[in-house]
Amino acid sequence: MLTILKNATMLVTMDADRREIPNGAVVYRDNAIHWVGATPDIPASYLDQADETIDASGKIVLPGFVNTHHHFYQTLTRVVPAAQNAVLFDWLKTLYPIWANLTPDAVFISTQLALTELLLSGCTTSSDHHYLWPNGSRLDDQFAAAETVGVRFHGARGSMSLGESDGGLPPDSVVEKEPDILKDSQRVVETYHDPNRYALHRVVIAPCSPFSVTADLMRESAALARSFGSEMNVHLHTHLAETKDEEDFCLERFGYRPGNYAEELNWLGDDVWHAHCVHLNEHEINNFAHTCTGLAHCPTSNMRLASGIAPVRAMRDAGVNVGLGVDGSASNDSSHMLSEVRQTMLLQRVMGNPHAMDAREALEIATLGGATVLGRDDIGALAPNMAADIIAFDLNQIGFSGGAVHDPVSALVFCYPPNVSLAIVNGKQLVKDGQPTMLDVGMMIEKHNTAARLLIADS
């Protein structure tokens, strides 16, 4: 099926030349882009063949955003009063007993809701780091839910094995045995991982953090992921250097700073990305750059938990691959990618340099940056042979009035963050006129709220 999207007020390509095309157009067949340019220049052959035409008048069109770090299940525990004003370790200790009541149904509905919320904010590809598997819940529940939404999904099979009785942070009731973790990690890779271009499903191996797993599990997880070979391209993910408490824990228990500990564990490389990295020093940043190790920057969560400001400017200048993550919806309480783009720009300026980050760089991090971090060269830009993952925001909104006249690209970041009016993933319209096309949102919210009440009631 050949589709022409045309008449976009501005088309932001993120291609090799970073073209921004007034009155822009995109031509795609099925799930892949064939042509990008100005509407008057659309080749006649495409006009003759078109099965569908989408009028993007009054809209700014971009490649879909890529979310590189989240915990979907945490949508069920947003704004829990006892965790509203806590730093990371206290926040975790408050919520672990609640999360221990997760069920397969809770995992399914929270995944469905989080992906829909992300989609409405412009996200077309998302990873999720899920590391608690109580009461029979499995990564399979997340893949089943992702199928109902249609967003590209990288399911990160997380794990915790270092309970309180062994000197870790999580209670023993939510940890797993390491042989079981490795066995199930292999199973889900073999079942769900698709290494092909335009894949909708991939699997990531993702022990939770240095304070919740052993060094042995970190090393064995890395070895397992790499045993599948370059053809499968299975990636690794974990939390790292999120707080000063974690730095102290790593120094006391392992004798290394977090970034150096990652190096000791073979957790650096272009098949690895870490979440947060607020407290890396210059040496660790340079190691990330030299090894092409990626970063999921989560500015709102870092502020919410008083963790600090990740040195994204220094990382970008050193050559580190940086993507964005909204992080868990109990440490952000939102899953809005465009809001995270805005926070990224503003937070790098807060130390006094208004040139530390501009709107276009923040958008690049949210698109091409995320694609690189996830190891994908088929998303993140609007160009021939790239995936037909396209989003559009309506510029005729009160919050953009004036700004869209002067600079519609920057207005998208500087002004208030709305939801998309259109979202296309893999060539399919998943949001039309601002509404999801595949799900009844009202019914989903009702089911999700019921699951949230049950989770708290059982804790």
Image: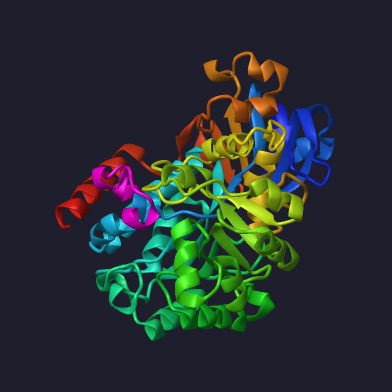
Name the residue at the top extreme.
Answer: 402
Expressed as whole percent of the image width and height from the top left, the position of residue 209 reads 46, 67
Res. 458 image quadrant: bottom left
Identify the residue at horizontal 39%, vertical 43% (top origin): 439
Q: How many marks?
A: 0
Identify the residue at horizontal 70%, vertical 45% (top origin): 28
Q: Magenta stretch: residue 251 in it?
A: no
Expressed as whole percent of the image width and height from the top left, the position of residue 182 reads 45, 81
Expressed as whole percent of the image width and height from the top left, the position of residue 75 reads 35, 48
Identify the residue at horizontal 35%, vertical 52% (top origin): 74
Which colouring convention does the figure follow?
A: rainbow
Q: Which of 98 and 49 is in front in this view?
A: 98
Name the residue at the bottom extreme.
Answer: 179
Q: Magenta stretch: residue 76 in it?
A: yes
Residue 207: tell me if it is visible. no
Q: In this view, does 217 lie above or below 262?
A: below
Q: In this view, does 129 lie to the left or right of 104?
A: right
Q: Is residue 173 above or below residue 296?
A: below
Expressed as whole percent of the image width and height from the top left, the position of residue 383 reads 76, 46
Q: What stretch is highlighted in magenta?
A: 75-91
Residue 263: tell me if it is visible. yes
Res. 39 image quadrant: top right
Question: Which quadrant: the C terminus?
Answer: bottom left
Q: In this view, does 59 lie to the left or right of 335?
A: right
Identify the residue at horizontal 33%, vertical 43% (top origin): 85
Q: Which of 217 and 115 is in front in this view?
A: 217
Name the residue at the left extreme.
Answer: 457
Q: Is residue 37 left or right of residue 345?
A: right
Q: Nearer the viewer, residue 229 or 265?
A: 265
